[in-house]
Image (cartoon, helix red, strand yellow):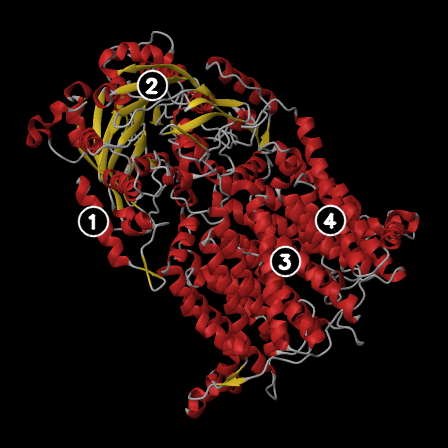
Amino acid sequence: MRGVHKRFGPVVANDGVDLAVAPGEIHCLLGENGAGKSTLMKILYGLYQPDGGEIRVRGRQVRMRGPRDAMALGIGMVHQHFMLVDRMTVAENLIAGIEPVRHGLIDLARAREQVRAIADRYGLRVDPDARVHDLSVGEQQRVEILKALMRNADVLILDEPTAVLTPQEVDELFHVMQQLKADGKTLIFITHKLRETMAFSDRVTVLRAGRNAGTVQTAATNPQELAEMMVGRHVSLRVSRPPQTPGDVLLELEGVSVTDGRGHARLRGVSLTVRSGEILGIAGVEGNGQLELEEAVAGLRPLAGGKVRIGGQEPLRAGPQGRRDLGLAHIPSDRLRRGLAAPLRLTRNGILGRHWRAPFALRGVLREPPIRSHVSQLLERFQIRGRLEAPAGTLSGGNQQKLVVARELAHGPKVILACQPTRGVDVGAIEQIHAQLLKMRSAGAAILLISADLDELMALSDRLAVLYEGRILVEGPAERFTKPELGLWMAGQRPAAAGAEGARNV
Amino acid sequence: MSDGKAPAAWAWLRELLVSLGAVALALLVGAGLLALAGYNVADAYVSLYQGSFGNIYSLADTLLNAIPLLFTGLAVAFAFRGGLFNIGTEGQLYVAALATALVALALPGWPSVLVITAALLAGAAAGAAWGFVPGFLKARTGAHEVITTIMLNYVAILLTTHLVKTQFKAPGPVDQTALIPAAARLPELIATTRLTWAIVIAIALIALVDWVLRRSAWGMDVELLGQNPEAAAYAGVPVQARVAMIMAVSGAIAGLAGSTLVLGVLHRFITNFSPGYGFTGIAVALVARTRPWGIVPAAVLFGALQAGGLSMQLFARIPSDLMTVVQGLVILFVAAPGLVTLFRRRAGKTGMALEREGTR
Amino acid sequence: MSDAWDVIFQINTLTAALRLATPIALAAMAGTLSERAGIVNIGLEGKLLAGAWAAVYVTYVTGNPWLGVLAAVAAGMLVGLLLGLFAIRLRADHVVAGVGINILLLGLTTWLMQVIWGSRGTSPTVTPLPRWSIPIVRDIPVLEELVGSHAPLVYFTLLAAPLLWVVLFRTPAGLRLRMIGEHPEAADTVGIPVHRTQYLTLLAAGALAALGGAQLALGDLAWFSQNMSAGRGYMALAANVFGQWNPIGSLLAALLFALTDAVQMRIQTLPNPWPTELVQMLPYLLTVLVLSGAVKRSRPPAALGRHYPPDHSAGAP
């Protein structure tokens, strides 16, 4: 790929990017969130049309009008958000578009055979008749890889494949990648994690803000050099967490259970306490009850059993307002889905959830002067660039998240429910948000931190708990866990039983 | 993430252009239909203009037609702002009209102000009840309001017809109630024009809705629901109660269209009296881009089309149902953000509650 | 009173129900098809009207009701294409576009009726579709009465439901279509042309719904009348939800709605009839009730009503 340009409205995602991948290598595409990695790969896979530049496959210049063209050229892609239909079976997902047919009908028997044949060849075991929603995340990823292989991919693009995996599953993926490489496949591996880059790849291309920051042999570089190429300046992502003696219990969960719409238990008797001046981190593979825990604490989902106490009291009113009354702040895990109403102005989003209260409203009438001064303060304190009357949707992702965090922390909360507080934001915003959370900790807030980012959890938390299949599997002081151990817990295993397995973890 | 720098005035102008463009395009297609059917397009549209803005009488006719549309348009627009599609305004105005007529008939000898107020309130209450049902069902069961409101339109028309036929029929061949007493009639604003105080009520209501949406916490609840229901729940908005309430308020507003027609124009309830004020309200609301003050020009526009359509039928012998065609086209054109991009070739944003599915 | 209740269980009420169910069932299956492909089809009402009008007009001109049926198919496909243009290409909200189409077709058919026949109420009478009796069935007593002699489109509907089921759930085309309705990105990334498939689906759905209109005009009656669909398109959507987005379920739900319709029509012919209007409300009230009861248990296609690519996909990060 040479000189690839792509812009989305005013945002330039790729600005003259070059990428050369040699056959049979594992090539890492490294960069921060928003550096343009996924965009570049979606262009290579025909999902986006570039605004400029050229693509050559095996020396021949090509034009991808869609994934069909890419597949015809032997390019396959494993997407970060799996492209699988939950309600369908593995086989149905795998054969869609290339269905074996007999008498005009889908030949399911042959489909199963095809799936088994290719699965056996690469040691990727799956049950062709299982429904996708019954599979674990790791299994779903296997299906994604199989999907590309069934379409005869020689070049396999893996978009942030490790983001959703436990360290053990990452190991497994690494094995599979080695096997694919041995079979002559070429792999392009997208990540923002330095250690994975060092461990997995033969060569690395680093992107920064939509441009090339360089291509190097993995063997000839080191993490520090890569980090500097990635962010363009020397950074240390370590935060200082001053020792502090926790105070009273401010958040208490007692045997909290939650069921989903179909009556399946999603949280099974979760009991937790968080004290003043303490951060409790919740680790776990996504889909093990994190969202349900968030919603249960926030009052967005009725409890099937158990109690939530904030500051020692049970909320008088059901729903989020009852929790807010008692001093809960909630940074939701998905800012665009829940934390903001993108088309509304900053002066509305800045008071979301408090728009019935003084001083923002008096007897149900909104009062602009206090609203405006409050929201300007939020913008100032968090260095958010934006006009008060602009819709929140016009802010960048980092600024949107900062607005949500600023809003929630503004009222001296007793308890902070912080869910994926730095997901999808730039380094600058991450530093700022972490600093603010620690400031609240010093001020005596009790913080429940739910995050998929292990580094974040380990850096911020005083104590850690692992959520597995809706239960708290283990809980203890953060220092007591190593990353590999945490990984095993997240996979539902006791570290002792697994022995030295974790040592090779990367 | 499109141009965040564009000042609000530009967005406003852009939406105005979209609306005008949609109407122009619909009239253009209408012209094509006229030509295909062998009519003289120029004659037709001249008589459309004559019948709507041509002289003081046709202008009064236009305004007269616009009054119920102010109510139904506002009703639909308000529901849209809350993320709900009320196509049941037709049924709501029927039940309201009958309730109003019955109260007006039941209070002979009362002072004018009292009987009118009582009759209007009765109409609004009936309309609210008729809107509350689909709102409640939507909140409780998820039954799509488009289907339930349209079913209730049929029920309302049949129910009012039944009640008039069996209980309240005035002697004569037509299924209608007796005339309401003079004291119950809305006074004329301008003598001999049939333009009554209804127009003042409508404008006041528009001002009120505009204020509520922009300046009240309850209005912010409504906007939140329309723009992002999940954010509304997160903010602690009681979603189910609001949904039912929004539909009830929308129904009350729509009901006043029927009530003011009874008190100001018809002076009785006549079965099947509405030429589709409810459905035209959808086009009005969309052309107004769901902005309360936008309802005024939009209602006048469609009032003109209705008045002009009738004169077209009378003088050029062209069936006035062409105006229903134009309404359908306007709805399609206004609702299609892609149409704008076709002209501007740049990613546009509608900023309307209608895109609520797309906000993820 | 007891006469009225007896009516429900009379065999010719059931026969009538089968006949009356046909337009709703065809429209409901059209709804199933398009919603499985992710397109909300509020426009069914308009397609019924378009089909009915085209069928009567072409029969009026040619004297051949079969040509009328063909014309209905063409008209329905045209309306389907129109919905596609707005809902897919121009990214209009599916529901608003559907309502727009319904109002457009209500106006257009009424207008054309006046332009061509000079009447706003009903068209002249035309040759209806013949009634077919099925060779073996006509010798079996009860079955003969029930399904013995109907317009051909009634039989077509009974065959179409299982056939559509097979297409949806057993053929490559059906798998691809369903994948689009569940997860268009997934379909796109394996090379299934999302928009082209949706357009084709809407063409087929338009044809099906319009056949329902043809049955209404040429199978039940022999003329077109203003707004003759009378909300059946919306009932069909409710039937589709009640039938869990399954063609056979849609057919069964349509039969349920039609049964109330048949009952209300039969009750009106009784010597001491119930109040006409109250009885006529039955199908509408039933629709509201059934829909309210059905929605909670149902799971629509995951990407129903969504545009592809998504509306706010502009900014990648």
Determine which of the numbered discs, if any, sits on residue A116 in the image: 1
Residue A263 in view of the camera: no
Is C308 left, or right, of B52 in this rendering?
Answer: left
Q: Distance between the Cα atoms at labels 1 and 2?
A: 35 Å
Disc 2 target residue: A205
Q: Nearer the viewer, residue B277 or C176?
A: C176
The residue sitting at the front extreme is A60
Q: Helix or strand or loop: what does disc 2 sit on?
A: strand
Does mark 2 fall on the same chain as mark 1? Answer: yes
Disc 3 target residue: C102
Q: Are marks 3 and 2 in contact (CB under 8 Å)?
A: no
Query: Mark 1 vs mark 2: which is more N-terminal?
Result: 1
Mark 3 belongs to chain:
C
Expressed as whole percent of the image width and height from the top left, the position of residue B238 reads 47, 42
Q: Helix or strand or loop: what does disc 3 sit on?
A: helix
Residue A375 in view of the camera: yes
Q: Nearer the viewer, mark 3 or mark 4?
A: 4
Mark 1 belongs to chain:
A
Q: Quadrant of residue B202?
A: top right
Kind of residue at disc 4? Ala
Does mark 1 fall on the same chain as mark 4? Answer: no
Is B307 left, or right, of A313 in this rendering?
Answer: right
Q: Quadrant of residue A230?
A: top left
Q: Nearer the viewer, mark 1 or mark 3?
A: 1
Q: Distance between the Cα atoms at labels 1 and 3?
A: 50 Å
Disc 4 target residue: B26
Q: Helix or strand or loop: what does disc 1 sit on?
A: helix
The local crowd at label 1, few if under 14, some if 14 to 19, many if 20 or more residues have their Cα within 10 Å, is some
